[in-house]
Image (spheres, rainbow, N blue to C red):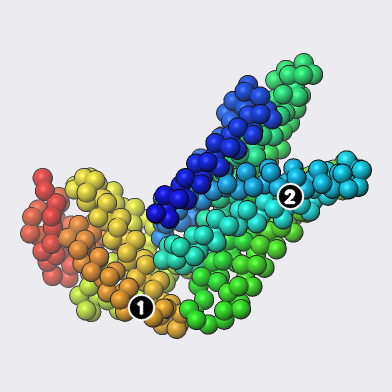
Amino acid sequence: MRATALATLLAISGFVILALVREQTGTEGFLVGLGLAVLPVPLLISAFRWLDRVQPGPWRNLIFSFAWGACAAALIAIVANSFATRWIETATADPASADTLGATVIAPIVEESAKAAAVLLVFLFRRRDFTGIVDGVVIAGVTATGFAFTENILYLGNAFGTDQLSGTGAGLTSVTAATFFVRVVMSPFAHPLFTVLTGIGFGIAAAMAPGRGRLRKMLLPLAGLLAAMGMHAFWNGSSSFGEYGFFAVYAAFMVPVFGVLTWLSVYVRQRELRTIRQELPAYIAAGWLAPPDPFALGSLKARRLARDFATHYGGRAAAKAVAEYEDCATSLALLRHRGRRGRAGADFAVRERELLEALWARRDYARPALAYGSQIAAPMWLPPVVYAGPPAPGLAYTYDNEPYRYNPYRY
């Protein structure tokens, strides 16, 4: 019921924002803007998906985030910004001042708040999928990518309309080309960069122990949101810093911040892989995991090799089972890590048992594939795993002369 209501809201928002943008740009300008604005979207989504490879979140969360940014957040922004700018213009009788104030104060507050709403909704209602900084970065970044997509359609469509009125055409000196260069080539990451600060605040709050530091859990996302607003305002106001103010802010501020946040995200991802290698060996003695599993699951290369192996010998069903095994094992390792630090919830034992049973149900597909992946990825680090060719029913590998007798692959 809740999902249906939310989907209906996003659909209505999408139709309304589509009509508003088309009204402002004209049909031809809208189509040109749409064709140009879509170009950076696959690259940005792929970058955030790559960052989320250790524990990929469900696609439904990413689809919701992008749709919220492109439809609901964009609609809120275009309506609220227009209303606020007109009100300031009427109150001050100074259109230039109203535009400047709208761009540097009103727009950052409205737009970042609208985008942060998507992160908040996932944080509240998809809590199992939101466990740390990487999740916050991905959800915030995808939301902002959707928002920038709609905003770029508007800017590029208006630029094309300006060129049509002036008779400039579509050359390199056109307003459309200049707008495309600034918004799509130079700074496609601008909106994601702002909103990622909000996502980091939510991510740190998500990683904290349940029931502790409630005030900090509220203040951290708020601090991230304020930082996003401040950075957004600084970026929007760069054009008022002189002829080369925009380029100075871009080179001296935006690019370094982008580099730092990228490094932080990759560092956190590597720390998750290290946590997997450290936490999962505890389950080997109990028989839940096979000896090669911790290393294979803590190596992106070994995980990819395992999925490729399963696809080659077992088809899509085997590959899906191995991917699900990897996801469940990752969740188990991070859950155990939080539990040892006193940050797991009251449902720790229940959740742990659910994940272990999910692993057990997929072990027949996953163990041979992960054994292969671990041996190929780091043969010098592991005891010998004897590979006897394509898996045969009943016996595919031996590990220290101990047979794996679980193999559902069929040929």
The total number of labels drawn is 2
Residue displayed at 62% across by 23% down: 27
Q: Nearer the viewer, mark 2 or mark 1?
A: 2
In which quadrant of the rendered view does residue 53 lie?
Answer: bottom left
Q: Amino acid at mark 2?
A: Ala
Residue 87, position as x, y percentages in the image? 82, 46
| Quadrant placement of the N terminus | bottom left
Q: Residue type at mark 1?
A: Phe
State whether residue 169 is above or below residue 281.
Answer: above
Which of the two labelled residues, at mark 2 and mark 1, occupies the earlier sequence position? 2
Camera-side residue of 121 and 208: 121
Q: What residue do we see at 75% from left, 22% from top?
A: 163
- From the viewer's perspective, is 17 left or right of 291? right
- Name the quarter where the C terminus is drawn: top left
Q: x, y percentage for residue 31?
A: 59, 25
Judging depth in this view, the residue of 165 and 94 nearest the camera is 94
Residue 192, compared with residue 40, is above or below; it is below
Residue occupying the point 87% across, 44% down = 90
Q: Quadrant of residue 275?
A: bottom left
For mark 1, give the secondary structure: helix
Badge 2 crowding class, 10 Å Cα cut-off, few under 14, some 14 to 19, many 20 or more, is many
Measured as percent of width and height from the top left, residue 315 is found at 21, 45
**What residue is shown with label 1?**
348
The answer to whether residue 120 is above or below residue 149 is below
In the picture of the structure, the residue carrying the numbered disc 2 is: 107
The quarter of the picture where residue 70 lies is: top right
Gap between marks 2 and 1 measured at Cα: 42 Å
Task: Provide the secondary structure element on which disc 2 rests.
Answer: helix
